[in-house]
C-alpha cells in the first residue's frame, strides 16, 4: 500500500480464522493527502499488563502502530498498560469522561453498568470466535453494541479475539457442583454470575494482580485466557489443576472504545484508517493465539500441570443457569432483551450451519488416523 494513499474497503472473511484484506486504491476510494490533514495526538489506556505485550496488550499496540504508519505519523496514539493512567478495570470510565481519547479492554468488565455489554466480549455457552466475528460484522452485533455504548458517549470496534479460552486454575480438584460451593474464584462478566449462582464467591481482579491473589490464597481459583498468557503470568506456579473448556468464554472479543466526541472530530480518512487498524488487530490476535497455545500447553504439562476436563454435571448445571440468567435479564432489561433476541437467533442459525460444515469435519479428523 502506498503510504500517501488509503482505501477503507476491508473484507473480513470467516473461515477457521478470519481473513483480512486491505484493498488497493480505487477511483471511488478516499485519496489521503496526509500533508493536508491535521496532526492528532491521542492516548489509549488498556486493561492489560506489560507482560502480555505479545498478545492482548499487543493487540492494543498494533492498532496504534498501524494508525501511525497509515497516516505518515500524523495521527499517533500512545498506549498505556493497566495502572499507568487508570486501573485496568476503569478503561470505559476514562474514555467516557474524556480522561483519554480511547481504550483497549473487554466489554464484559462493565456489565455492572449494563448487563448487555457482555455480548460485546462473549457469553457463557455462546459464540465461538468465528461465530462472534460473523455476528459482529454481518449479523447486526456491532450495530447493537454501538447503540448501547451511545449511552456512554463511546463508540466501540472489535480489536482482538482470544479464541476459546481455558477453564481456569484451581488449587484443588472439583468434580461436582457441590465442590464449587464457597470457592473463591477470579472470574469476570456473566460467567462470574453463573459461577455465583453455583455457589462460588466471585471476585474480579485485573490480569496483573491474579498471580499474587492466587499464590497468597486470596482466591482458590482463577481464570485468565489460555496456556500462553497464563504461563506468562505464572499462574501454573500458584495452582496445579488446569481445567477446560472455558465455557464462559468460547470466543472472547477485545475492543477499542473511543470517546464519541473525539471520534466525531476526526477527519473521515482517519476514522477509516482507525477502523481498518482495529480489524487487523482482531484478525491478528486470534491467529496468534492459535499459533502459540498448543506449544505452551505442552510445556505446562511437562512441568507438572494437571489438565482436567470439567465434569458433565458442572457443564450442564452451568449451561442451565446461564440461559436462566439470560431469560430473566431479558424480562427485566429492555436493552438486554434487544441484543439477546438478535444474538440468540443468530446463535441458533449459525450453530446449525456449523454442525454441518465445521463440527462434522472436526469430529472426523480428531478421530481419524491417516
Image (spheres, rainbow, N blue to C red):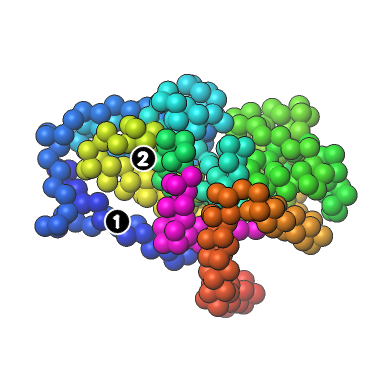
Left or right: where 266 falls relative to 50: left
Q: Quadrant of residue 33?
A: top left
Mark closer to the observer (2, 1): 1
At which x and y percent is residue 168? 70, 45
What are the residue bounds of the magenta stretch? 125-148
Q: Secondary structure at mark 2?
A: helix
Residue 175's label in the rendered image is none
Q: Foreground: 194 or 223?
A: 194
Marks 2/1: CA–CA distance: 15 Å
Disc 1 crowd rating (10 Å Cα; few below 14, some 14-19, many 20+) is: some
Look at the image and say whether residue 228 sits in the magenta stretch: no
Residue 10's label in the rendered image is 1
Q: Quadrant of residue 95?
A: top left
Q: Secondary structure at mark 1?
A: strand
Q: Main secondary structure of the magenta part?
A: helix
Residue 49 visible in the picture: no
Q: Are marks 2 and 1 in contact (CB under 8 Å)?
A: no
Residue 63's label in the rendered image is 2
Residue at image x 47%, y 35%?
Answer: 152
Which quadrant does the C terminus fall into?
bottom right
Disc 2 crowd rating (10 Å Cα; few below 14, some 14-19, many 20+) is: many
At which x and y percent is residue 84? 48, 21
Residue at image x 58%, y 50%?
Answer: 334
Q: Foreground: 303 or 191?
A: 191
At which x and y percent is residue 44? 40, 30
At which x and y percent is residue 6? 19, 48
Residue 38 visible in the picture: yes
Q: Foreground: 137 or 220?
A: 137
Amino acid at each position: 500500500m502506498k503510504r500517501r494513499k488509503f482505501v477503507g474497503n476491508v473484507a473480513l472473511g470467516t473461515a477457521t480464522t478470519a481473513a483480512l484484506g486491505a484493498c488497493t486504491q480505487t477511483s471511488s476510494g478516499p485519496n489521503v493527502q496526509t500533508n493536508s490533514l491535521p496532526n492528532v495526538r491521542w492516548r489509549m489506556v488498556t486493561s492489560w499488563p506489560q507482560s502480555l505485550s505479545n498478545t492482548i496488550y499487543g493487540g492494543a499496540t498494533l492498532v496504534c502502530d498501524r494508525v501511525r504508519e497509515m497516516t505518515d505519523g500524523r495521527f499517533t496514539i500512545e498506549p498505556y498498560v493497566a495502572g499507568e493512567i487508570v486501573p485496568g478495570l476503569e478503561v470505559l470510565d476514562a474514555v467516557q469522561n474524556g480522561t483519554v481519547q480511547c481504550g483497549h479492554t473487554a466489554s464484559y468488565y462493565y456489565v455492572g453498568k449494563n448487563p448487555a455489554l457482555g455480548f460485546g466480549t462473549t457469553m457463557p455457552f455462546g459464540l465461538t470466535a468465528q461465530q462472534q466475528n460473523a455476528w459482529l460484522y454481518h449479523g447486526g452485533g456491532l450495530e447493537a453494541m454501538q447503540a448501547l455504548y451511545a449511552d456512554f458517549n463511546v463508540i466501540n470496534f472489535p480489536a482482538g479475539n482470544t479464541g476459546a479460552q481455558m477453564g481456569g486454575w484451581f488449587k484443588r480438584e472439583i468434580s461436582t457442583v457441590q465442590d464449587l460451593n464457597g470457592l473463591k474464584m477470579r472470574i469476570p462478566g456473566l460467567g462470574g454470575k453463573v459461577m455465583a449462582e453455583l455457589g462460588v464467591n466471585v471476585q474480579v481482579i485485573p490480569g496483573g494482580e491474579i498471580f499474587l491473589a492466587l499464590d497468597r490464597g486470596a482466591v482458590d481459583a482463577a481464570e485468565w485466557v489460555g496456556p500462553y498468557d497464563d504461563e506468562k503470568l505464572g499462574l501454573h506456579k500458584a495452582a496445579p489443576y488446569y481445567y477446560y473448556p472455558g465455557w464462559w468464554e468460547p470466543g472472547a472479543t477485545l475492543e477499542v472504545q473511543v470517546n464519541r466526541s473525539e471520534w466525531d472530530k476526526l477527519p473521515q480518512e482517519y476514522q477509516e484508517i482507525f477502523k481498518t487498524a482495529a480489524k487487523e488487530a482482531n484478525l491478528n490476535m486470534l491467529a496468534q493465539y492459535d499459533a502459540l497455545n498448543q506449544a505452551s500447553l505442552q510445556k505446562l504439562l511437562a512441568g507438572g500441570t494437571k489438565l482436567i476436563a470439567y465434569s458433565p454435571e458442572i457443564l450442564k448445571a452451568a449451561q442451565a443457569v446461564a440461559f436462566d440468567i439470560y431469560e430473566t435479564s431479558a424480562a427485566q432489561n429492555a436493552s438486554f432483551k434487544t441484543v439477546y433476541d438478535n444474538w440468540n437467533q443468530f446463535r441458533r442459525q449459525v450453530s446449525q450451519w456449523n454442525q454441518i460444515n465445521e463440527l462434522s469435519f472436526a469430529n472426523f479428523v480428531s478421530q481419524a488416523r491417516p
